[in-house]
Image: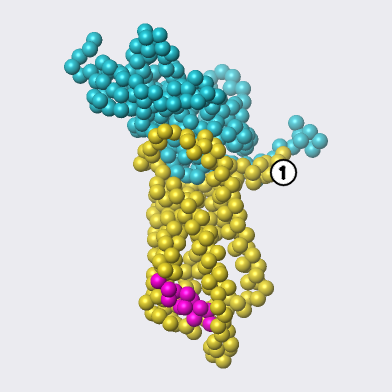
Amino acid sequence: MSSNNDMTLNLKIWRQPNGAAEGKLVDYRAEHVSPDMSFLEMIDVLNDQLVKKGEDPIAFDHDCREGICGMCSMMINGKAHGGYKNTTTCQVHMRLYKDGDTIIIEPFRAKAFPLVKDLVVDRKGIDKVMMAGGFITANTGNAQDGNAILIPKPVADEAMDAAACIGCGACVASCPNGSGMLFMGAKISQLALLPQGQPESPRRSLNMVHTHDVNGFGNCTNHAECEATCPKGISIEHIARMNREYLKAAFTYYEKSRSEGGA
Amino acid sequence: MMAAAVNHYFGSSIGRKQMVAVTGLLLCGFLVGHLAGNFLLLVGSDAFNLYAHKLFSLGPLLYVIEAGLLGIFLLHLGLAIKLNIENIKARGGAKRYVVKKNTGRGSTFMSDTMPWTGLILLVFVILHLKNLKFGTYYTTIVDGVEMRDIYKTTMENFQDLSTVVLYVIAMSAAALHTAHGFASSFQSMGWNHGKYFKNVKRIGYLYAVAVGGGFSTLAIYCFLKGV
């Protein structure tokens, strides 16, 4: 399948057997790389060669390979997902690189993302934040009539923009503070915009922010590097909406205890 | 639960950064008042001294205001340091990445240097108080009233070129700090909306240039005018 367009690339890939071991960048030469390959396919080919040589293949996360699952990660040349606008690593194609290029590949890093192996990190922290309130608990029953709850189109659009988050963690990896505010803000904002999410918004904001803080994520200082690297183009306006929701909830939300006559 | 939620607020990532934002904006307001007062230097010694005397005449109220200002300053400083230390840990230490590049669409020089410009301002504020507020005490008589000649202290302070240069550096740090801090405070408080946030950013930059430039210009004016 090789053609004249094939490239040879010099890769420097982070290898680390496990979280406790020392890691380092290891040089690899990727030959016969077609410009039509995706970034992950390029590593697949390299891994194939490594396996044939009896070496340990490079561990990396991936699943759908169509930009919607949020599994692929990687810092490519110092930028999360390679730093291309609205693009996940799996949607980065080798045509973006030139023959002879050196590409440095590192795992996403943050205290909240402990390293598992090579380029694989444990992004459980993100799931924990989601489990703390990223849902509604109303029993939805059967599907309602489409127009039973009227939501203005611009509001629905904005909620959808926030809902586009795939939880990949690029925001955390590229944040100078290792903060998960864009991810969390997207969910809090999305649900706060919609009537179905509003009743539980105060409790959701309090619980999610608390869970975020205790799981090792950092504090946002408004660099907006998250917004710039987010493969789904989520705006920090959603962080602002979360900040509002949280402020409101912290000072007004009150759950009566059983002794006070609450449930 | 109510008490718990409010307590959480003051210990949480968002609660603390909102306190940094509010105290920061209050300090921004203070700087406007300070700069406006300083412009009386251009009017003359009597105008400047009378203004200062008015402030001194507030008596106990002045101490309350000063204590409040100090409290705001220390809260801003203390929380910012605490949040920064946590952030260094949260990012995974100093050797986070072998290569890390900003996208150019997010972080700016201003946002990256916030802790450093902040520390420059801390050192500056200490020296500034030492040299001026607690500087040489001259007296003068304006309209038959004896009062502190703070005009003379100020003029003397800026006769040394190195003082002026350091002052301008500190004010540049203030400009960089507020250029990010002003709009950032609005974002932290949740006041970011597509409809007006671009203008908040513009006002922030304008504010930074006006404050940094204003104070610096006055220092240079004092230097050039001589005693």
Residue visible at 36% across and 23% down in the picture: A27
Looking at the image, residue A182 lies above or below residue A66: below
Asked if residue B194 lies left or right of residue B64, the reply is: left
Residue in front for this viewpoint, B127 or A236: B127
Residue visible at 58% across and 76% down in the picture: B55
**Which residue of the protein is positioned furthest toward the bottom in this rendering?**
B144
In magenta stretch: residue A199: no
Tell me the quarter of the image containing the C terminus of chain A: top right
Residue B65 visible from this viewpoint? yes
Highlighted magenta segment, given as a residue range: B149-161
Say what amino acid the circle numbered 1 marks.
Ala
Per the rendering, the colour in which chain B appears is yellow
Residue visible at 42% across and 68% down in the picture: B162
Residue in front for this viewpoint, A140 or B166: B166
Per the rendering, the colour in which chain A appears is cyan
Residue A69 visible from this viewpoint? no
